[in-house]
Amino acid sequence: MSSACLVRLSRCSHQYLGRSGLFQMTLPALQLQQDSHLRFTIFRRQFYSPSEKRHSNTRFDADSSGQPTTWDSFGIWDDRIDEPILLPPSIRYGKPIPKVSLSKVGCASLIGQRKENEDRFRVSQMTDSILYFAVFDGHGGLEAADFCEKNLEKCIKKLVTEESNLELVLTKAFLEVDKALARHLHFCPNVPSMNAGTTATVALLRDSIELVVGSVGDSRAMLCRKGKALKLTVDHTPLRKDEKERIKKSGGFIAWNSLGQPNVNGRLAMTRSIGDFDLKNLGVIAEPETKRISLHHVHDAFLALTTDGINFIMNSQEICNVINQCHDPKEAAQRISDQALQYGSEDNSTIVVVPFGAWGKHKSSDTSFSFSRSFVSSGRWA
């Protein structure tokens, strides 16, 4: 929908039908109430004569065809998430943009077969216009993941007041937190070593439409678009040619363990992380790779952030299919973490599921999965 269409809608005295009832909206009301919300469903008047078949009043069957009305055919999202449309961003971008509510976000973190859960996650309303989502997978102790959970958001919040480019903000924040963690570990008498480290995958959502992701390590961010998994991150492992060359140029080496997994200097399974200061001069860096994407709420169903306890055992499309079967994001997060354990994951497994406009629209018919797993096709290389 173009901005011109939105303006014409605002000038008309048509009735708008929200999921909770009817209300009138005129241009003066729009001007006086810029922060008010339109509901998802826009009422289209139906004209009929007594001899004609009267159309149903329900949005699920507006023309009595027996088929639910969808965004593509009528101008609504046929989903199960009841959220208002944000008016100022919708006018700014020229298309309806639904509010993404933290109350609908699903999160789950299971310890698996480990002695303790070194995964951390955080979801918050960072500013009036920016939502913050993050997962951290710690190793070598809890210190690095704990530190990032408590301090990375604060650093980003400070930087967004100085810089509008969210990709630059994430890059600066990751590097600053890495330096702050080094100081923290150096002066903290209770920390046994400087070998603690963590992955970090962070997503910032501005105005419910601008999605920016930054990541180091092998935790992942994935967007479900038109029912298909769209990867927003690429694992930082020695299997990547560019990452392996950087490690070697810095004086490090790659060694394979008994399971055939490559490690930096025989110790670390990733080439980028926050922490791991004993390997910093050997090419392990904290600079994230970033990606910016504009959401299309008519096609985009959800964002999923996952740690490798899930990624190692389930590929991205499989995760996407399972989530699409779930009624709400909270159920989806719990089901994915449980599924990873059932498939044999021994690691901590953490997931954050953020619903968008097309939630519930792209249901997959593939609901059964084999327990005889192929780790080559379903592991961290998927």
Image (cartoon, rainbow, N blue to C red):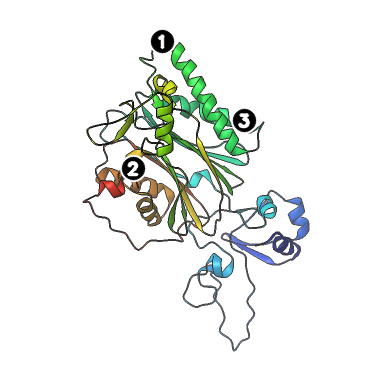
- Looking at the image, residue 287 sits to the left or right of residue 164; the answer is left
Task: State how far apart marks 2 and 1 are (Cα).
Answer: 36 Å
For label 2, count other residues whose C-alpha is less than 10 Å away and answer few (under 14), some (14-19) or many (20+).
many
- Residue furthest to the right in view is 28
Circle number at residue 189: 1
Q: Amino acid at mark 2?
A: Arg
- Expressed as whole percent of the image width and height from the top left, the position of residue 331 reads 38, 49
For residue 34, side relative to residue 70 (left or right): right
The mark that comes first in sequence, 2 or 1, is 1
Which residue was labeled with disc 3?
159
Instruction: Give me the C-alpha separation between circle 1 and circle 3.
Output: 30 Å
- Given contact means CB atoms under 8 Å apart, are the residues at marks 3 and 2 in contact? no
Residue at 55% across, 56% down: 297
Question: Which sits in the foreground, 370 or 36?
Answer: 370
Location of mark 2 (residue): 380
Amino acid type for the residue under numbered disc 1: Pro
Identify the amino acid type marked 3: Leu
Q: Residues within 10 Å of mark 1 (few under 14, many from 20)?
A: few
Image quarter of residue 206: top right
